[in-house]
Amino acid sequence: MSSHLSSTRLKNETGAAAVEFALIASILFMMLFGIIEFGRIFSEMEVLNSAAREGARVAAVRGTPDDVEAAVTAAADPYEPDEAPAADKVCSDTTSGQPVTVSWDQHFSISVGILPPLDRDVEIKGVFRCE
C-alpha cells in the first residue's frame, strides 16, 4: 500500500518543477535585462558627460561656439546630444580664471519587459576654468 501512495504522489508533482521554474525564470530574466539596460544607460551618460567636459575644455581655451559643438559631437560618438551643447560664457582676457560650463538636457528611457518605461531628463554638464 505504501508503494502505491508514493507513486501517486510522484505523479501529482511531475509538473511542479516546471511551473516553479517558469515563475522564477521570469523574475530572473527581468532582473538580468534590467541590469543590462541600466548598464547601457550608465555607459551612455558617462560618454556624454565626458563629451561635455571636452566641450568645456575647448571653450576654456577660447574656442568658438562652433568649435565647442564640434568637440562635443566628436567626443560623444556614437551617441548624440538631444540639444545643441552651448557654453554659458565666452572666455576672454576679462573672464580668465572663471568657470565656463557646457551643458544640455538629455532624455533617457529605461524599458524592461512588462514594467512601464522609466523616462528621465538629465542635465549633462562639463566645467573648466577659462584660460
Image: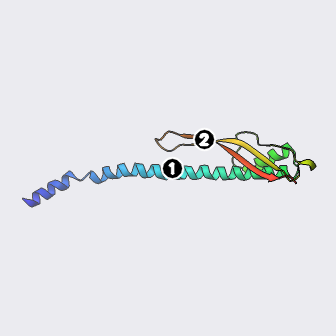
Residue at numbered disc 2: 120
* Residue shown at 77% from the left, 46% from the top: 102
Q: Position of residue 16 (x, y in %)?
A: 27, 52
In-front residue for pair 12/92: 92
Q: What separation in Å lies between label 2 and label 1 (alpha carbons)?
A: 16 Å
What kind of element bears circle 2? strand
> Relative to residue 117, is residue 56 drawn left or right?
right
Q: Are marks 2 and 1 in contact (CB under 8 Å)?
A: no
Identified at 19% across, 56% down, the residue is: 10
Classify the position of the C terminus by image quarter: bottom right
Count of picture labels: 2
Q: Judge depth for marks 2 and 1 and give the one in front.
A: 2
Looking at the picture, how far across and down is residue 68, in whole percent? 82, 46
SS assignment at label 1 = helix
Left-right relation of 67 to 50 = right
What amino acid type is highlighted by mark number 1? Gly
Type of the residue with mark 2? Arg
* Residue found at x 69% / y 52%: 47
Residue 115, given in percent of the width and then of the height, sits at: 47, 41
Q: Is residue 80 left or right of residue 66?
A: left
Q: Nearer the viewer, residue 120 or 79?
A: 120
Q: Is residue 55 left or right of residue 45?
A: right
Q: Which residue is mark 1?
A: 34
Callout 1 crowding tier (Cα within 10 Å): few <14, some 14–19, many ≥20: some
